[in-house]
Structures are given as C-alpha cells and as structure tokens.
Amino acid sequence: MTAMTSTATAPVHPKARALTATTLRRRQRALGVGAAVIANSLLYLAARAAGTDFTLTDPGATQAHPLILPEIAVFSLVFALLGWGSLALLERITRHARVIWSVLAGAVLVASFVPIFIEQATVGTRIMLCVLHLVVAAALVPMLRHRAAARTR
C-alpha cells in the first residue's frame, strides 16, 4: 500500500501578495528613516562628548548658534522623510524611480555640504556635520532594495 501525501497549500490571492510586498517595503523604509535619526543622534552625542562644539555663525552675523540634539534629530527625520516621500512619489509616476531617486539623492547630498562651508565653524564641527549628512544618505540608500511593484496596465 502506497501512501500519498499532498503538500497543497491554499492559493494566495494576488492582492494579498502585493500587500505583503508593500508592507515589507514600508517597514524597510521606516527602518532606514529610524536608523538615520538614531545614528545621527548617537554620533552627535559622541562628538559632543569628544569636544566638538557644533557652534555655527552665519556670515555677517555676530551671534553664534550652537546646534542641539533635538535640532539634529528633527533635521535628520525631516530630510529622511523627504527622501522616502520623493522615492514613493517617483515610484508612482515613473518606471525609472530608482535611477532618478539615486541621482536626486546624490545631488541633494552634494548640495547639503554647501551651507557647512558657508557657515563659520571649527574644523571639528564641519567634519562632524559632513559625517552626519553622509550617515543620513547611507541610511536611506537601502530603501532602494525593494523594487516598485510591477505595473499592470
């Protein structure tokens, strides 16, 4: 007597599969945003402990502005969310979202260095601000791992 076993599984509805991919993509992107904020906050605290003053003075101004942890965290969060939002928008309107977003993100990163060198600051502050900008970029790049769901027309 031969026993037959079946490994049949319930059929998965196509929308359920897409929902899972969307959920995974959102989760990964939220983790990227969170990683950017947490990493920058920790780097800021470590740099402050090591003696970096994070004090900026606008050209022509007489009063200096010391950056504080909430400013670092909020700026990191805002720009990370803008990165996520721009990628999500591009995925809805073009098939080349990954390439366009990569170029856009690179341009924004390069442009973000300009104010660092316009402001009057110590070398240590400038270096750490550059590192903080790079950390946000590095945390957001993994958002590109998941491709947008194939379009059906």
Image (tube, grey):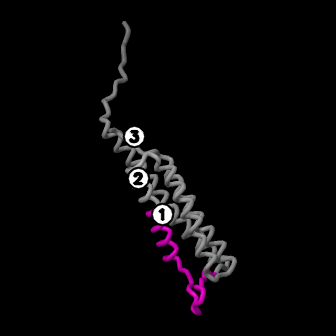
Residue 2 in the image: x percent, y percent? 38, 9
Q: Secondary structure at mark 1?
A: helix
Residue 15 in the image: x percent, y percent? 30, 40
Which span is picked out in magenta? 53-82
Q: Residue at x 34, y 44 (%)?
A: 19
For marks 3 and 1, the one nearer the N-term is 1
* Residue linked to disc 1: 80
* Residue linked to disc 2: 26
For marks 3 and 2, the one nearer the N-term is 2
**Above or below, 125 relative to 110:** below
Q: CA distance from mark 3 to mark 2?
A: 16 Å
Q: CA distance from mark 3 to mark 1?
A: 25 Å
Amino acid type, label 2 = Arg
Dot 3 alpha-carbon crowd within 10 angstroms: few under 14, some 14 to 19, many 20 or more: few
Q: Nearer the viewer, mark 3 or mark 1?
A: 3
Q: Residue at x 45, y 68 (%)?
A: 78
Q: Nearer the viewer, mark 1 or mark 2?
A: 1
**Above or below, 150 relative to 139:** above
Report if residue 71 lies within the magenta region.
yes
Residue 27 in the image: x percent, y percent? 42, 53
